[in-house]
Amino acid sequence: MAEVREVLGEAPEETALRILVVEDEVLIALELECLLEDLGHVSVGVAGSSADAIALGRTASPDVALVDIHLVDGPTGVEVARQLSRDPHITVVFMTANAKRIPPDFAGALGVIVKPYSERAVAGALAYVAQCRAGRPPSADALDGFHLAPALGGGAWTGGAP
Amino acid sequence: MTGFPTGASLPTGVTVEVFAAAFEASPTPMVVTDPRRGDNPVVWANGAFLALTGYGREELYGHNCRLLQGPLTDEAVLQRMRVALAAGRPFEGELLNYRKDGTTFWNGMTINPVRDEAGEVVFFFSAQADMTDKHRLEVAMRDANDALEREVAERTADLRSALEQKTALLHEVDHRVKNNLQVISSLMLLKARRTPEGDARDALQAMADRIGALSTAHRMLYSEGDVSRFDFREFTADLIADLAAGLDEERTRIETEVDSLALSAAMAAPLALLIHELATNALRHAFPEARRGRVAIEARRCAAGMRLVIEDDGVGMASAPDNPAGFGRTLVEMVVRQLRGNLEWSDAGPGTRIAITIPLTEADAP
């Protein structure tokens, strides 16, 4: 439980992440930015369409992209994840209620935070990402609401839907 | 004519003429050919054979039976017949034959060699039957079968496509419900963030937490293969994990002991609200001023259905500050009523004990 408390608290400075939010629901994006800030991370921008997301991925130099599958221009989040994850500096995490659409290879993403998510799920996932990026062996315990891609030990992904 | 091997002896008076007359009168078409003459010609045919083929005797006698064949006669069967006859073996088969007027009929025939005492084949005797009706029936049945299979295949394809549509629709609705819950939760939290600390902000935060509990219920539903049930133990663990995340574990902790129960999906939302409300209430009011303690949540199958006990070792009901709005308690009572259960608040000394019995039918928990 101490671990959970730690991840819910503000991230230490060296683990503060620059985060790109790819989300077409303005309210969700806005609230998520507030949450990221509470957790000690930095939002580098919000993209509602695939074109904006890919452009921001190039110019805003994010560490992490939180990517919804369904964007303004359709279910294009998978392609966004594929493009962004080609950049070795960007860790992509899906954030979607449409998890059934995630391909088996996760389009290069590290995992998925399933909507509706709790603040704890977001905090836990980002702490995990921060540890991964710092080269420390991350503990996959206490990862509620965050599923790793199958290739990274997350087990077969059933889509979390019927 | 040489002698023939005889079987049963003939009674007195049964002469060759009697046989000839009997064969002539038989309704079974019969024909005899003579392989010792070139091209194995017909040497005798009875009236039924003439009626079947439409030929007169003079048109048949001296001719090979192949005059009954035509373009659609099966060459493979003919070949089998030729090989059998050349080897002096009997033959049985069906051939499409042509009458004199060109119409066709299915001719089911047996051909037997007739041997003399030396064992040499001197005649072939053949009896026929018109199998046209049987063939027509077979074709009709095959057609009916094919039609039936086609219909079944079409129906199956229709059903499969209907199921695919329903599944896609279910995914779509599931996705929308989850997305909308996220929007509602974000809306509440945004407003809470912009509200000065105090009652209004606490109320908004409390509503956002309740929506969070409902969200957990929806996340758990449909995540397994069975869309109509959820695992109550996993579900409670998920709910409690969200609550426990905000706790100082040194001071307060939540313990759960929950039976593994596959409950009906319809119970997920009310149970999520109920457990969230009671656990939150205990955490908020039982331990004022840094008091240490624990909240225990226990759910067991019982004869009536399920017994849910939430108990804390805090300050107890009497010491808790009076909540004028009492929304949490009203909510709990409403949800218990919806679940057709009953609720007992009691003093656990120290602390408060809430026992809820929820009846489960066969449909709720098999």
Image (cartoon, coloured by chain):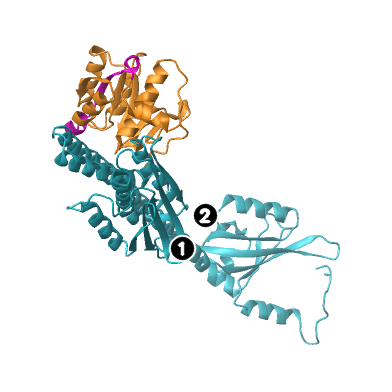
Chain colours: A orange, B cyan
Q: Does the magenta stretch include residue A17?
A: yes
Q: Mark 1 points at which residue?
A: B302
* Residue B232, x across and y down, in percent: 41, 51
- Neighbour class for label 2 at 10 Å: few (<14), some, many (≥20)? some
Q: Can residue B5 be seen in this view?
A: yes
- Type of residue at label 2? Gly
At 34% from the left edge and 56% from the top edge, which residue is drawn?
A: B267
Asked if one can make out residue B224 in the rendered structure from this viewpoint, the answer is: no
Residue that protrudes farthest toward the bottom in the picture: B12
Q: How far apart are marks 1 and 2 (CA)?
A: 84 Å
Quadrant location, the C terminus of chain B: bottom left
Q: Quadrant of residue B355?
A: bottom left
Q: What residue type is labelled 1?
A: Cys
Q: Which chain carries label 2?
A: B
Residue located 27% across and 30% down the image? A68
Whether residue B170 appears in magenta in the rendering, the answer is: no
Magenta residues span A12-29
> In which image quadrant can residue A65 be found?
top left
**Element marked by disc 2:** loop
Q: Mark 2 points at which residue?
A: B70
Q: Give the vertical position of A103 relative to B300 (above or below).
A: above
Q: In this view, does A155 lie to the left or right of A26?
A: right
1 and 2 marks on the same chain = yes
Q: Position of residue B225 (x, y in %)?
A: 42, 47
Q: In this view, does B125 lie above or below B208?
A: below
Q: Mark on residue B3?
A: none
Whole-percent x, y for residue B231 in the image: 43, 50
Give the foreground label among 1 and 2.
Answer: 1
Mark 1: few, some, or many residues within 10 Å (few <14, many ≥20)? few
Q: Give whichever of B87, B286 is nearer the camera.
A: B286
Give the side of residue A35 with respect to residue B257, left or right: left
Image position of B17 with respect to B278: above or below: below
